[in-house]
Amino acid sequence: MLVKELYGELYLKIVYFGPAMSGKTTNLQQIYAQVDPAYRGKLTQIKTREERTLFFDFMQIKMGKICGLTPRFNLYTVPGQSYYKATRKLVLLGVDGVVFVADSQPERFQENVQAFLDLKQFLREMNKSLNSVPTVLQCNKQDLDRALPPDILQKRLNAQHLHCYPAVATQREGVFETLRDIVVQVGKMATV
């Protein structure tokens, strides 16, 4: 775990990972819109002309204390498109926690599987695993008619060991529950 301590502050990195258009950026936009400006930094987005994430989205939030230090959680998204594989891996460097945002549409299931396999591979290449890095599964787009239920997605991704949250990020449903869980998990690891 890469934890940086500077001037009484603790810097922790959380990465929202998943397939293209699963809702990673929407999660950060909802967090940004709802968190008091006194506790969040600017939302930085680097997009293509088509409004897709090109490199990453980034924002910082601060809250409470951990071992007398003020934690600053650096939240990142990765581009979901498979041709940005190197970028996704680069953004994961130094990660302290991961939110895997799955798209609940049945026709997107294979893309979820591929992104999940990529995540596991990238972590392995960094001598880490889903068991050593706090990870939460968010099953987004649960409002759609044919959405796969979270327990089915979790089972099919072989992610039963992960905390799992249903979500509709566009309506803020599940966004803060997911964030709260990963922040708590990462905070616990930082005190070890």
Image: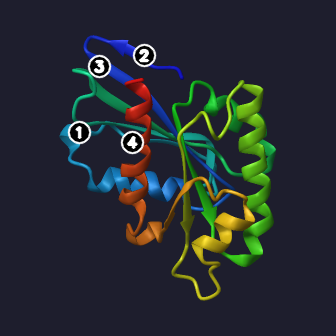
Give the amino acid at mark 3. Answer: Glu
Foreground pick, 155 / 2:
155
Give the amino acid at mark 2. Answer: Lys
Q: Secondary structure at mark 3?
A: strand
Task: Look at mark 4 in the image and give the residue it sits on.
Answer: 183
Relative horizontal placement of residue 15, taking residue 3 as reference (left or right): right
Q: Earlier in the sequence, mark 4 or mark 3?
A: 3
Foreground mark, 3 or 1, reads 3
Q: What is the basis of the colouring in this image?
A: rainbow
Task: Look at mark 3 in the image and give the residue it sits on.
Answer: 9
Task: Look at mark 1 in the image and give the residue it sits on.
Answer: 39
Q: CA distance from mark 1 to mark 4?
A: 14 Å
Q: Earlier in the sequence, mark 1 or mark 4?
A: 1
Q: Earlier in the sequence, mark 2 or mark 1?
A: 2
Q: Quadrant of residue 87?
A: top right
Task: Look at mark 2 in the image and give the residue it sits on.
Answer: 4
- Quarter of the image with the N terminus is top right
Q: Secondary structure at mark 1?
A: helix
**Residue 161 image point, x, y percent:** 61, 53
Identify the residue shown where x is 51% and y is 81%: 143
Q: Tell me the number on the disc at residue 69.
A: none
**Residue 135 image point, x, y percent:** 55, 45
Q: CA distance from mark 2 to mark 3?
A: 8 Å
Number of callouts in the render? 4
Foreground pick, 135 / 115:
135
Asked if residue 43 shows in the view, the reply is: no
